[in-house]
Amino acid sequence: MHSTRSAPQPPPSTDRRLPVVDALRALTILWVTAFHFYADSRGVPGPDTASAAAAWAAVSEGHLVEAGAVAVRSLVALPGFRLDLLLFVTALVSMHGRPQPVLRFYARRARSILPQYWLGSVAILVLCVLLAGVRAAVGPHPFGWELHEGARLAGAPYQFAWLDVLRSLSLAGRLEDARAMQVVAPSLWYIVLVAQLLVVFPLLRRLHGMLGGPALVVLAAAVSWAGRAWAFGVEEPIPGFDANATVICFLPFRLIAPALGIVAAGWMAGPAGARLGGREPVALRWPAAAAVTAGGLAVLTGAMWLGAGVNDPATLLGVLGPALPLVIALPPLWWLATRALGHAWAGGLLRWAGARSFSILVVQDALRFVVGTVEAWDVDLAPWTFVLLPGYLTAALLLARVWHPWPEAAAVAVTGWWGASVRRKARSSLELDVVTHDGAVCVPAGSAMSLPSDGTPQANQPGPKPV
């Protein structure tokens, strides 16, 4: 006779991180890193060098190698919706957890972001000063010129002013104009965009609860599309920002991606979400796996080409923005992430990188200024871009491993100091006399000593007692 008692179940996991979300976050930040290296070594690409039209022209002329090169350029360097993928993942991660009071939510997010941001800004500033000294030592220009004019980013001179330090550290100072967005540590403007999302996220979450997912996406689309249509009809929609910079740098023109992330998080919480977040990918033999992966990459690359015009005010796609390419690209990206998680080494690397995405963002800025110094010495890196790219990504991961503990240690130290300060103030307040409405003096409950009515000291008396 067999017992009908079920086997004991293991305790539920306390790790609330979803592997597939960490993998998506890692793919996004490595994508950003690859794009920046491409732009720094070859210049910012345009539709003439990475587009469906350029690929079709190469194919029609029989230049298949050139067509493949166009596809690679598109995959690496021309994702017009790269920022929206970042916003999608950020919203999805923010929804993955219990709702919190607004102030606690802000405090937790500030603790996770601001140490990286501030320490990263200071570290990049120190590196810029050191590199300027190196360029001045071996070149014809003095240190001051090298510091303010000598660096190069994305194939163009990068200007620095000491006031930029305050603009960067204040975070809000980056909103002064389009140039200020990329001062000191230029890639940290991504954090400014993420911070905009986190500020309005409690409202978006509340709207999701009130309206439901489809209505939230429709509302976000209406706001984004109306805003983009208006911005592209005005010469300077926001002071200091032209139309293109406005729709890139400000969240109201990119609301669809975070709305989709909030809705996707709701799907992941249900039975379908368990399949997306927890199950192993479908096992396929290598021919089928290769075919599906190639198809996913083809769709992804096609979405890149489609995304080339998402900020072009002369097209309907410019008004619609990155939403359409993002929706097209998400399924193959999700597939690639789940496939990678099926392999111990690749999955572990992506999960590790996803948990350290902000650290990678900081250290790749340091690498950008090193590349800019090499470019300032008239070294042409363009022929070597794709040869050096794997080593560049590897260097970013290794530096992130070295850098990541420092902001965390700073956050722990500041949090501990603040907590100790609050506790000291709480203990001090217990020693203060309190005057009641009738003029009697009371000693708060829980104090080390209170005074009974006869004035005799007595330890640990309950409640505030009038004297």
Image: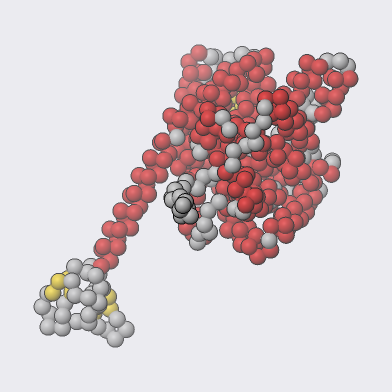
> In the rendered view of the protein, which quadrant contains the C terminus?
bottom left
Q: Foreground residue, 193 or 329?
A: 329
Between 429 and 452, the one lying in front of the other is: 452
Furthest residue to the bottom?
A: 438
In the rendered image of this protein, does residue 336 appear above or below residue 430? Answer: above
Which residue is drawn at the image coordinates 28% and 58% (left, top)? 424
Q: Is residue 454 left or right of residue 338?
A: left
Q: Is residue 5 or residue 438 the one in the foreground? A: 5
Most extreme residue toward the front, as rendered? Answer: 1
Give the x, y percent position of residue 127.
47, 27
The spot of residue 28 in percent (x, y) is 62, 36
Kindly identify the residue that appears in the image at 18 percent across and 71 percent down: 460
Q: Position of residue 429 (x, y in %)?
A: 28, 66
Q: Is residue 161 above or below residue 438?
A: above
The picture places residue 350, in percent across and down from the top left corner, at 55, 33
Can residue 347 be seen in the rendering of this structure?
yes
Residue at 40% across, 44% down = 411
Please identify the quarter of the rendering in which residue 448 is found. Answer: bottom left
Q: Which residue occupies the foreground of this view, 66 or 9?
A: 9
Q: How is the image coloured?
A: secondary structure
Q: Pick out the residue farthest to the right.
A: 60
Q: Which quadrant holds residue 385?
A: top right
Residue 193 seen in this snapshot: no
